[in-house]
Every structure is written in structure tokens, then in C-alpha cells.
């Protein structure tokens, strides 16, 4: 089993209309966000202008989490208060504007594919199931002390990525050790083998 350790030095920074975005992971790895040819993309963006308008992503669905402040998201027919560490799923084709400033965490998936976000917190040890049908990513959203994922030691804002291999079975697990104040995001990106 091989787990890739990514730090802020490995992330790709770019500007968007309301702030800066930090791409942590994209799949397939040769894809470019601007070309809209990716299947999955994991990123974190600052929202520094209020109000801001989100980029419309016609062929994608999204999961969004605020990492700092509560912001208000306005959709065509409704509005929603996005509180810190509470995920919201919506279509990337939606026209969305936001009021307030924060840093967020984004999961983008091409329509017809699936990604699941699990937030790990309030415990000092977790056992995560390893799924050979997934690419699995762990992001340390908040941690005063290093977090251990398998044999890796991750600081706050670091990520670990596990690509499935034939040696991973449905009964394989990985241990995650952290203090109880840590918040870790686990993203399971399901690969369509058809």
C-alpha cells in the first residue's frame, strides 16, 4: 500500500474572481482545471470579496465546507447559511453568490460520478476502511499537533492520497491518530471502471 503525502508546497495556487484557490488534488493527474476535463478536483479557496459569485461548472457537482466563518449562499430560489464544518452539496451548474468572507474546502466531481465527504473529529483514533473502488484523500483541516495517517505524519493543511491497488481488499484498514481538537476530512472518490 502506498500513500502519497502532499504539503502546501505541492498544491497549485491560482486566482479566482473572489480570492485565491489552492488545488490539492486533481484526477486524472494530467488534467487542467481551466480545461474542465477533470473527473475529480479537491481544493481550498479564500473568499475575500463580499459579495462574490461562484464559478459556474455546468458538468460538475460540488460539496462545499466553510473552514472559518459562516457565510450566506444565495441560489436562484433560496438562500442558505453555510456554517463552519457543515458540508453542503449542490450542482455546479447553479448560479451561486456568497455574502461574507471565509476559507472553504471544495470537492468537485463530474456529473455521473460519486464522491463522499466524511468529517472526522472529536476522537483521538480512527480506523478508516480502504476501498479498492476509490481514490481516498485525507485533508487535515485543523490540527494543533501532527496527525498520523498510516505511517505518515501530517501537519495542518497537509493531505494524504491513497490510490487503490490490487493488493487492497475490502477488509483493509488504515489507522488515523490525532488529538481530539483535530478536524480531518476524508474524501472517497469512486472510480467508474466500466
Image (spheres, rainbow, N blue to C red):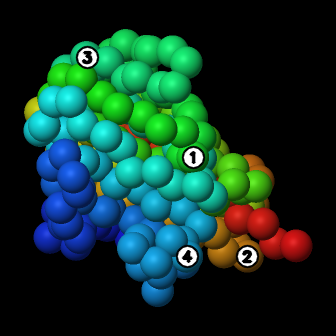
Residue at (23% x, 70% y) in the render: 12
Give the Cα separation between the discs numbered 1 and 2.
36 Å
Tag shown at residue 166: 2
Q: Position of residue 38 (x, y in %)?
A: 54, 72
Q: Quadrant of the N terminus?
A: bottom right
Of discs 2 and 3, which sits in the foreground?
3
Tag shown at residue 146: none
Q: Is residue 70 visible?
A: yes
Give the Cα separation between the discs numbered 2 and 3.
42 Å
111 vs 187, nearest the viewer: 111
Tag shown at residue 70: 3
143, above or below 93, in the image: above
The kind of secondary structure element at disc 1 is loop
The kind of secondary structure element at disc 4 is loop
Pointer 1 or 2: first along the chain: 1
Of discs 4 and 1, which sits in the foreground?
1
Tag shown at residue 37: 4
- The crowding category of the residue bearing disc 4, from other C-alpha atoms within 10 Å (few below 14, some 14 to 19, many at least 20), is some
Pointer 2 or 3: first along the chain: 3
Q: Which residue is mark 1?
A: 93
Amino acid at each position: 500500500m502506498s500513500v502519497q503525502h502532499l504539503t502546501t508546497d505541492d498544491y497549485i495556487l491560482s486566482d479566482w474572481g473572489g480570492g485565491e484557490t489552492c488545488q490539492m488534488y486533481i484526477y486524472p493527474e494530467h488534467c487542467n482545471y481551466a480545461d474542465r476535463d477533470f473527473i475529480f478536483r479537491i481544493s481550498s479557496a479564500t473568499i475575500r470579496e463580499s459579495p462574490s459569485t461562484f464559478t459556474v461548472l455546468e458538468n460538475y457537482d460540488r460539496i462545499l465546507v466553510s473552514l472559518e466563518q459562516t457565510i450566506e449562499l444565495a441560489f436562484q430560489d433560496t438562500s442558505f447559511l453555510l456554517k463552519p464544518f457543515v458540508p453542503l452539496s449542490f450542482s455546479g451548474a447553479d448560479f451561486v453568490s456568497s455574502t461574507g468572507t471565509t476559507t472553504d474546502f471544495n470537492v468537485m466531481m463530474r456529473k455521473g460520478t460519486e464522491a463522499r465527504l466524511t468529517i472526522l473529529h472529536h476522537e483521538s483514533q480512527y480506523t478508516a476502511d480502504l476501498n479498492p473502488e476509490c481514490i481516498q484523500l485525507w485533508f487535515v483541516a485543523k490540527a494543533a499537533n501532527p496527525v498520523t495517517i498510516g505511517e505518515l505524519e501530517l501537519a495542518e493543511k497537509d493531505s494524504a492520497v491513497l490510490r487503490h491497488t490490487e493488493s487492497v481488499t475490502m477488509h483493509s484498514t488504515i489507522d488515523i491518530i490525532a488529538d481530539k481538537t483535530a478536524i480531518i476530512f476524508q474524501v472517497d472518490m469512486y472510480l467508474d471502471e466500466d
